[in-house]
Image (cartoon, rainbow, N blue to C red):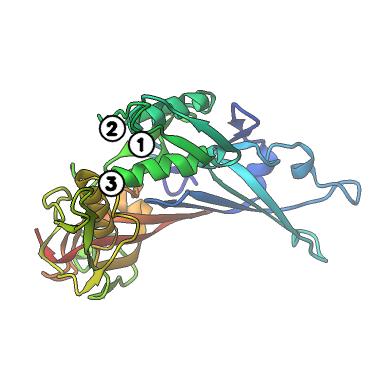
Amino acid sequence: MPDLGIRLQLLAGPTVPVPAPFAVMDALIELTVTNRDKAIDGFQLKLTLGRTNGSNYPILGDGALDPPNRVIVAVLIGFSLQVLIDGIVTQHQVTPGNRPGQTVLVVTGEDITRRLDLEEKKRTFENQSDSAIVETILREYLTYGLVPEVTSTHDSPSVSDRVPSQRGTDLSYIRELAVRNQFVFYIEPTGVPGINTAHWGKDNRQGTPQPFLTLNMGALTNVDEPIAVTFNAMGPEEPQISILDPFTKLAIPVPIPTGFTPSLSGRPAAALRKTQPTDTANLSAVQAALRALTASAEASDAVTVTGEVDAVRYGRVLQSRRLVELRGAGEIYDGKYYVREVTHQIRRGSYRQTFTLTREGLGAS
């Protein structure tokens, strides 16, 4: 894409990806990558599929995009390289056409997180804290370039107290431990292709926001299409959690801790709904408080903003799981937001980024 000053890099291969063959790059029609804050990221390649000798498809024949090969997608904007996804191919779909150039191959895949979800296991972890368990599991995936970024926890139960046990895939168990500690878990690529950060800890609602998303400000505008803002007053909820006193057998209400999640708005929306989370009676006070905090945080975002930004005008890759500032949308909607999802749509001569932003209320903080 020389006219845009943007270069696309596509690597593919069994374990250590290499630059994709010229035939693949030449046949590429469209590439889509979706980065989400909690769900597994995904990608899709759409290519024209030509034949040789009447029946063979060379692109499929060379095996570069065979499942479950590894695929890395990166873009170079100016001198900045940003890896959009490091994943594995999970599916092919071919749509044959009656005329030359009309046959289309769609290659679909998911990020490297899916590797942690392929085998169910039964095992125990004696005398280990939750963070130590996560580090133990992640060490089994070092061949995929995983660099653990694990927040320490200090509750190490003795064998006489309880023995943590896994019944399911590594991914499901790591996520279970994350929820128990009011954490999130995701794997995302670094600036070095093939190296990925496995983050188990707080979500990234602090730190320096990404450059402004701007509309209605003349030459500074980089959001071309009108944004859509939704204020859902029924979104936030207030969980009512209680534990059972082991001696009196009476229910003891557990208050929701405050101040753990930084506020991004000046006027957070009040929780209109009160909920009753289950399976909390036998938890400790600390565990119940974390459960309440997790339930409250997951349903706290009342404001959602969707729109599309031109990557050329923006001058960089908009990243999910981080903050960004919005301006030009009006006083009650401007300010910091958490980027929940970004979809990158790349074609020849075009690079668009569709985004979803969220926060807990109106007005800048």
- Give the image location of residue 337, x and y in percent: 22, 57
- Give the image location of residue 20, x and y in percent: 63, 36
| Residue identifier under label 3 | 182
| Residue identifier under label 1 | 199
Give the structural element (helix, strand or loop) at label 1.
Answer: strand
Quarter-of-image position of residue 11: top right
User: What's the residue type where badge 1 is placed?
Assistant: His
Mark 3 nearby-residue class (10 Å; few <14, some 14–19, many ≥20): many
Task: Please indicate, yes or no, whether residue 283 appears anywhere in the rendered image.
Answer: yes
What residue sits 28% from the left and 32% below the top? 151
Tag 3 or tag 1, which sits nearer the N-term? 3
Q: Nearer the viewer, mark 1 or mark 3?
A: 3
Q: Who is closer to the viewer here, 314 or 242?
A: 242
Q: In the shown orientation, is residue 223 left or right of residue 44?
A: left
Vertically, is 72 above or below 42?
above
Tag 2 or tag 3, which sits nearer the N-term? 2
What residue sits 67% from the left and 36% below the top? 21
Separation of marks 2 and 1 at Cα, in angstroms: 8 Å
| Residue identifier under label 2 | 151
Separation of marks 1 and 3 at Cα, in angstroms: 13 Å
Task: Please indicate, yes or no, whether residue 85 appears anywhere in the rendered image.
Answer: no
Is the Cβ of the residue at disc 1 closer than 8 Å to that at disc 3?
no
- Give the image location of residue 170, x and y in percent: 50, 37
User: What's the residue type where badge 2 is placed?
Assistant: Thr
